[in-house]
Amino acid sequence: QVQLVESGGGSVQAGGSLRLSCTVSGNIYRTICMGWFRQAPGKEREGIAGIDYDSSTAYADSVKGRFTTWKDTAKNTLYLQMNNLQPEDTAMYYCAAGGTGSCRLTVIQYLGVQSWSWGQGTQVTVSS
């Protein structure tokens, strides 16, 4: 069982930046797909950034060009750099891990990810 712990959320003004971290337990980190998701109040959870075992990435249109995800394999940590944050980015942010091979697009399409291992979430609030 993979365990994930997110950190780095907080409150920022529009135009600001935050970096989220997701530390993963277990040595399968190097072979699994991972993703970042968010859920705003009253809305469904959505996938925003997926990363394959080989570090290939995919992003939702809503965050493309502003958010970047990458892995530090030495630290078993996944990161999400969020720049030019806007009030509509306010949400609970989650990382999740599961699947093998190329599955970064399944994150964006939110297909079959419910069975992945999930972190507890970290809140991001952006004020105007």
Image (cartoon, rainbow, N blue to C red):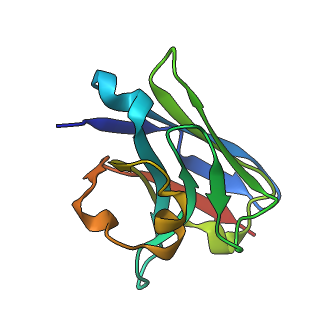
- Residue that protrudes farthest toward the top in the picture: 74
Residue at the limit of the structure toward the left, as seen here: 1
Residue 92 visible in the snapshot: no
Q: Residue furthest front?
A: 101
Question: Along the line of sight, which residue is nearer the eye, 121 or 2?
Answer: 2
Residue occupying image coordinates x 27% and y 55%:
116
* Residue positioned 43% across, 78% down in the render: 41
Residue shown at the point (41%, 85%) measured from the top left: 42
Residue 36: give x, y in percent of width and height.
50, 54
Q: Is residue 109 left or right of residue 60?
A: left
- For the point 58% across and 67% down, the residue is 90
Residues 91 and 60: in front is 60
In the picture, the quarter occupied by the N terminus is top left
Label tally: 0
Quadrant (top left/top right/bottom left/bottom right) for the C terminus: bottom right
**Residue 8: percent from the left, percent from the top?**
53, 38
Q: Position of residue 47 (x, y in %)?
A: 50, 67
Left/right placement of residue 84 relative to residue 89 reads right
Query: In this rendering, does residue 62 appear at all?
Result: yes
Residue 95: x and y in percent read: 42, 49
Q: Residue furthest bottom?
A: 42
